[in-house]
Amino acid sequence: MNKLITILLCAITLIACTRTENGLVFGLPDYEKRNIKVSQTDLKILLKAKELLSTEENWLKNSQRACTGNPPFNLYCALKTASNIIDGKYIHRRPALQEVRFTIDDTFNDRWTVHRLADFNNHAYTSYVDVLSVLEITINRVKLKL
């Protein structure tokens, strides 16, 4: 009987957990809630990131999150650079970046383990077209939320 209770408690705990870059967390952290408010600044950041990645030569595959501010860019660095250009600062959980993370969750959830932006960018199956697709989907989602 104790074994059954333990198994049930473990199952309930797993169901109530959310997978984030910080590992499994109980419940849903605020930054993972999908009803976040977006702004025109978020849209401009996404459009700028897409512009920074306007050619395949500007995209850097298999890289870390160390950004130079110059091309080529991985997805993370394009978003970070766009944030700095548009808003003068980078905020890791900015709604624009969270929306990109949500798009990755919805379309390529099997392509990340620890860091959604970097892992997705570096995944063996991720192509330049996939990165642009994620940005385009996210831009359209943000437009709908505005």
Image (cartoon, rainbow, N blue to C red):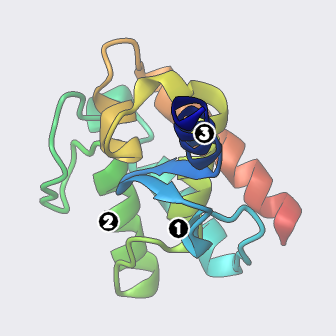
Q: Residue furthest bottom?
A: 88
| 41 or 107: nearer the viewer | 107
Structural distance between the alpha carbons of marks 2 and 1: 9 Å
User: Residue 82: x percent and y percent?
Assistant: 40, 66
Amino acid on which the number 3 mark rests in the picture: Ile
Q: Earlier in the sequence, mark 1 or mark 3?
A: 3
Label 1: few (<14), some or many (≥20) within 10 Å?
many
Label 2: few (<14), some or many (≥20) within 10 Å?
many
Structural distance between the alpha carbons of marks 2 and 3: 50 Å
The quadrant holding residue 34 is bottom right
Relative to 91, does residue 60 appear above or below in the rendering? Answer: above
- Quarter of the figure that contains the N terminus: top right
User: Residue 59: x percent and y percent?
Assistant: 30, 35
Relative to 112, does residue 18 appear above or below in the rendering? Answer: below
Q: Earlier in the sequence, mark 2 or mark 1?
A: 1
In the image, what residue occupies the spot 32% across and 35% down? 119
Amino acid on which the number 2 mark rests in the picture: Thr
Please tell me the numbered disc located at residue 45.
1
User: Residue 50: x percent and y percent?
Assistant: 50, 48
Q: Which residue is mark 3?
A: 5
The quadrant holding residue 66 is bottom left
| 126 or 36: nearer the viewer | 36
In the image, what residue occupies the spot 71% across and 73% down? 36
User: Residue 108: x percent and y percent?
Assistant: 55, 26
Structural distance between the alpha carbons of marks 1 and 3: 49 Å
Amino acid on which the number 1 mark rests in the picture: Ile
Q: Which residue is mark 2?
A: 81
